[in-house]
Amino acid sequence: MKDRSALKADRLPKALIALVATSGLAVMLFILWFLLRESLPVLKATTLGALMGGSYWYPTADPARFGMFPLIAGSLGVTLLASVIALPLSLGLAVFLSEICPRRLRELFKPLLEILGFFPSVVLGFLGMIVLAPWLQERFSLLTGLNLLNASLLMGIMILPIVASLAEDALAAVPRDLRDASYAMGATRLETTERVVIPAALPGILQASLLGVMRAIGETMVVLMAAGGAAVVPRSIMDPVRPLTSTIAAEMGETPVGSDHYHALFFAGLLLLAMTLSINLCALWIEKRGRRWRA
Amino acid sequence: MAGLNLSRRLFRNGCATILLYLLMASVALLLAGITAFLIRNGWSVLSWEFLTQPPRDAMTRGGIYTPLIGSIQLIAVAMAFAFPVGVLTAVYLVEWARDGLFTRTLRLAVRSLAGVPSVVFGLFGLSFFVITLGFGASLLSAGLTLGCLALPVIVGASEAALTAVPKDYRDASYAMGATKWQTIYKVILPAAFPSILTGAILAVGRVAGETAPIIFTGAAFFTPRIAQSLLEPVMALPYHILVLATAGTAIDKTRPIQYGTILVLLALVLGVTFAGVLYRARLRLKKQ
């Protein structure tokens, strides 16, 4: 009899925990729901084509214009340049740590990389304003050092430790046997790394890179402080840009709730969410494929 | 490989090794440079008074007591939400969930949550906590927004911790006649607790440095005193840096305070993260 009551008492915690566990799902659904609810009314003021393709972002002019193309171009430009700068370096760093680095040094650098992944981006943005911008301005005699290149360099510094740490995990997970087999065939370390270790770790490396790109698209403080904030399509890497994230952060504070501008900023958030979600799903797909491929 | 002779292959190998050593050295140098630069500029303002005095004279003098305490309050609210919810979600996923549609959706949702940009969390917090629930721009709204951001970190760490508890523990507990909940509560959670705690510490590190989610959910440009209730806005260290560096009344005059605030924020974030990483390393060592 006692056993049965204990079993009965088991049902309550299970139900409660299932309920609490649902909140993770609820938060995600709420985010989607609220972004949709607050962003779709902007389509009453303008068309989807004008919103995404228009090249003039004058949200407070009269009549207001909500062309987000320069903002999207800014986001993609900074992300692209940051990736071009940081991803090869991250891979190099990961290879160094996993294949070359003496054990002692590795035990120091690996945790250091992980800790650096937590570096507050507002501090990086600050360094961009104080150090990098004046230097760029003087070195290249520009009107302003706050531009696409500045933000991309900082963003590169930001994602470098994250990508390097994850890519190193992927490389370190490659079985020793594969390396030994390659060495036994007379291959050098470089050849082994290039042709055996990196291909074997490719799903993990790709995933790490995607995660870095995702972080870069969604990063706000660096671009808010160092990208210059001009809503024009950049013609060179020395042009100031205004990515989607910094537009939201800079303008939401002064926007009346419920105005067209307010809804337009939520639409920018929706675009960001769509981009990061699709990259995330891509990474998930690679993870599944990679697992099957390894098995 | 056939076309290349041995000495040329060895030469390429040597070059690559040297190149990667140089890469590592330059990254380390960059890091040391940034650290040295920040410390050199901020060291002189650091003092006990800097930590315990509120900002004065339109934030051009005084310390950072208010934003420092505000940051700690935000962390407390965020963790009060994210820790229990995150751990229980992980318990559900590991112990009860069968591989069904609900479980898979839940996993996907938590995973997606980890990739949501922080400024989007801010938008969500604004429309949900601030406006819909009527909390206003407050400690509660901003803290809960940060809690949502920390949730996937805690779920992930707790899931890994629970999965790592050996099956023997469960079997032994069941053999003694314990029910599933008793087993979870008395055996599995205590065994997994240290690892779960590590995850929570890392989540604190993540939350403490975030700026974008709190800009329009409850971080204040300036408040004359520490928030006395959950419904008051708070100052926070990361936002204080942004404000002083971009919107203050005397950007150049407050430069030393900006460097000082940065050092305190870095000490807080990196110190907490360092503690988490160190603690985890010790746990792993113990297991071996």
Image: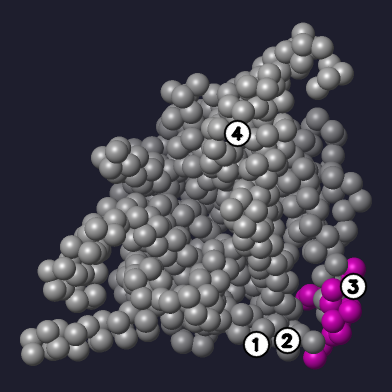
Q: Position of residue B213 (x, y in %)?
A: 54, 66
Using the image, tell me which numbered label, if any, was put on residue A37: 1
Q: Nearer the viewer, residue A30 or B130?
A: A30
Say if mark 4 contacts mark 1, CB within 8 Å: no
Tell me if label 3 and label 1 are in contact, CB under 8 Å. no
The chain carrying label 1 is A
Q: Which residue is mark 2?
A: A40
**Could you tell me which secondary element the residue under label 3 belongs to?**
loop
Q: Earlier in the sequence, mark 4 or mark 2?
A: 2
Q: Which residues are magenta?
A: A44-63
Q: Is residue A34 magenta?
A: no
Which amino acid type is marked by label 3?
Gly
On screen, residue A158 versus residue B185, left or right, reads: right
Which of pointers 3 and 4 lies earlier in the amino acid sequence? 3
Tell me whether circle 2 and circle 1 mark residues in contact (CB < 8 Å).
yes
Q: Position of residue B220 (x, y in %)?
A: 48, 66
- Is any part of residue B286 visible from this angle? yes
* Alpha carbon separation for disc pair 2 and 1: 6 Å
The residue under label 4 is A178
